Amino acid sequence: MKCPRDGTQLTRVIIAGVELDKCHKCDGIWCDRDEMERLRDLKISEVEELLEQKYGSPSFHEGKPAGHMRCPRCGEEARLIEYTVSYGKPVNIDRCQRCFGVWLDDRELNAIVEEKKRVDKITPEGPLLALLRSIGLAFRAEK
Ligand SMILES: [Zn+2]
Ligand SMILES: [Zn+2]
């Protein structure tokens, strides 16, 4: 799979036992639907639970097509659509309408990580996991 933003070959990374695809050029992360579901069902630490309590049930709003970006899995036929997921402050994600995979770019990740740095004792993976999990939860109602 190639990065939807810059075309770089994505590399598999493992976070909490779940395989994600990362672009080492722009630091974006691709998350397949089944990976998202596994993340959503993970047991989370106390800290992430606190974050969830603090930021409440995430919700999402469908937005516009995400520019020229195509789904790295489905290719030319599927454009990514921008969504806004509310988790503390709203985070923009790009989601494929066909395979329901999600693209998170560096900017979006940094926004959420910065936000979460205010909470003590978080693990480096904690904010990312909590975010991905909350995105999974936001979309669960849709199924
Ligand atoms: Zn990239
Ligand atoms: Zn797709």
Image (cartoon, rainbow, N blue to C red):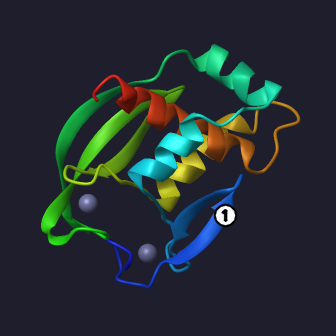
Q: Where the C terminus falls, by quadrant?
A: top left
Reply above or below: 21 against 45. below
Q: Is residue 92 left or right of residue 131?
A: left
Q: Which residue is depicted at the point 36% across and 31% down? A: 139
As drawn, is 22 to the left or to the right of 91? Answer: right
Question: Relative to residue 107, is residue 103 drawn left or right?
Answer: left
Q: Residue at x 44, y 50 (%)?
A: 34
- Give the residue at the far right of this rendering: 121
Quadrant assignment, res 67: bottom left
Q: Classify the position of ligand 2 by quadrant: top left, top right, bottom left or bottom right.
A: bottom left
Residue kind at label 1, given as amino acid type: Ile
* Quadrant for the N terminus in the image: bottom left
Question: Is label 1's Cβ within 8 Å of ligand 1?
Answer: no
x and y percentages locating residue 111 in the rendered image: 56, 45
Q: Is residue 137 above or below residue 99?
A: above
x then y, percent, for residue 131 = 56, 39
Please provide percent x and percent y for residue 110. 59, 52
- Residue for badge 1: 14
Left or right position of 142 against 57: left
Q: Residues within 10 Å of mark 1 (few under 14, many from 20)?
A: few
Count of marks overlaid on the render: 1
Residue 47: give x, y in percent of width and height.
79, 28
Which residue is at 48% across, 41% downward? 37
- For numbered disc 1, what is the local secondary structure? strand
Which residue is located at x 72 percent, y 29 percent?
A: 48
Please tell me in which quadrant of the rendered image residue 18 appears: bottom right
